[in-house]
Image (cartoon, helix red, strand yellow):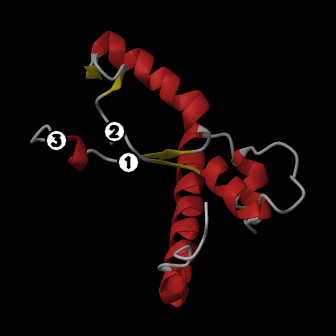
Amino acid sequence: NRDGSIYNRPIMAGQNIMTFDLPILNRYCQRFGPFDKQQNRNSLFYPFDFSDTITLFFSWFEHEARPGKLGLTTIAEHMGFSKEALASAHDALTDCKLVAKILKRFLMFQRNIMKKYKNKIKGCFANEIL
């Protein structure tokens, strides 16, 4: 982010990042930088959005019975990844690649839904009374 704008920062993505990675990242950035003292958070990532596989999984599958713990392996199995693909799970690089694949599938799925239904979604709450 060469221009210093928060709008050009990368969006944080991962598995369970809000309760695990982000507090650790903020602690390290507070100690070593970059850290935004006014906002009390790191200055590495775009501050207004994130992609967490747990949040995505829950929002799409909240109507189903929970498959137990929402660990990365559980989510990957629920989404159809083979046991062979998950054989080396819990290895940092393997887990990063798996999270990237899951996020990519979710984003592609959401984009396809929007392409198909964007005319039905736009203005769908126009006549709702709050």
* Image position, residue 73 (x, y; %): 74, 50
- Dot 2 corresponds to which residue? 45
Q: Secondary structure at mark 2?
A: loop
Q: Secondary structure at mark 3?
A: loop
- Dot 3 corresponds to which residue? 5
Q: Earlier in the sequence, mark 3 or mark 2?
A: 3
Task: Compute the Cα span from label 3 to label 2.
Answer: 11 Å
Q: Amino acid at mark 3?
A: Ser
* Image position, residue 47 (x, y; %): 36, 38
Residue 1 appears in which quarter of the rendering?
A: top left
Q: Amino acid at mark 1?
A: Ile
Task: From the viewer's side, name the closer residue of 89 and 56.
Answer: 56
Pair 3/1: label in front? 3
Residue 23 vs residue 7: left or right? right
- Dot 1 corresponds to which residue? 11
Residue 86 appears in which quarter of the rendering?
A: bottom right
Task: Compute the Cα span from label 2 to label 1.
Answer: 6 Å
* Image position, residue 19 (x, y; %): 60, 30
Q: What residue sits 57% from the left and 69% below the top?
A: 105
* Image position, residue 109 (x, y; %): 57, 75
Residue 47 vs residue 112: left or right? left
Q: For residue 87, say whether it is visible.
A: no
